[in-house]
Image (spheres, rainbow, N blue to C red):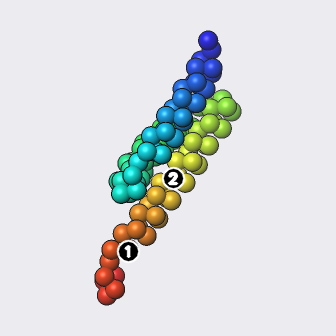
Amino acid sequence: MSSLSQALWVLLLGSLLGLELIGKVPPTLHTPLMSGANAISGITVLASLTLIQKAGDNQALLLIGALSLGFALFNVVGGFLITDRMLAMFRRKGDN
């Protein structure tokens, strides 16, 4: 089995496992789970930047690194915006 085939199997099985696990999370735990996902996405940003740096002239690795960087940044920024909005719900009217 080629390494690309193995990587696609890992991606498929990881995606299905993630979908199954997230579907069973009760609503009260979504905010802590989102904070953990932001931390993992922060690590993904660093890994993507490392991949882009090490890719050299390999266009496929540059594309994969750029896509993973874009998705990770989207998740980090969106997570922080949503977390800030949720925390704003607990502030008093007079607090800034």
Of the 4 image quadrants, the one containing the N terminus is top right
All told, the count of numbered labels is 2
Is 20 left, or right, of 6 in this rendering? left
Q: Residues within 10 Å of mark 2 (few under 14, many from 20)?
A: some
Is 15 left, or right, of 36 in this rendering? right
Between 36 and 41, the residue placed more toward the observer is 36
Between 47 and 75, the residue placed more toward the observer is 75
Report the residue marked by disc 1. Answer: 89
Q: Amino acid at mark 2?
A: Asn
State the residue at coordinates (47%, 54%): 76
Label 2: element kind: helix
State the residue at coordinates (55%, 45%): 69
Q: From this viewpoint, is residue 20 visible?
A: yes
Q: Amino acid at mark 1?
A: Met
Q: From this viewpoint, is residue 51 visible?
A: no
Between 21 and 84, the residue placed more toward the observer is 21
State the residue at coordinates (62%, 43%): 67
Label 1: element kind: loop
Of the 4 image quadrants, the one containing the C terminus is bottom left
Residue 79's spot in the image, x, y percent? 46, 58
Residue 71's spot in the image, x, y percent? 57, 48
Report the residue marked by disc 2. Answer: 75
50 vs 26: above or below: above
User: What is the residue that sits farthest to the bottom in this orientation?
Assistant: 94
CA–CA distance in space, label 1 to label 2? 21 Å
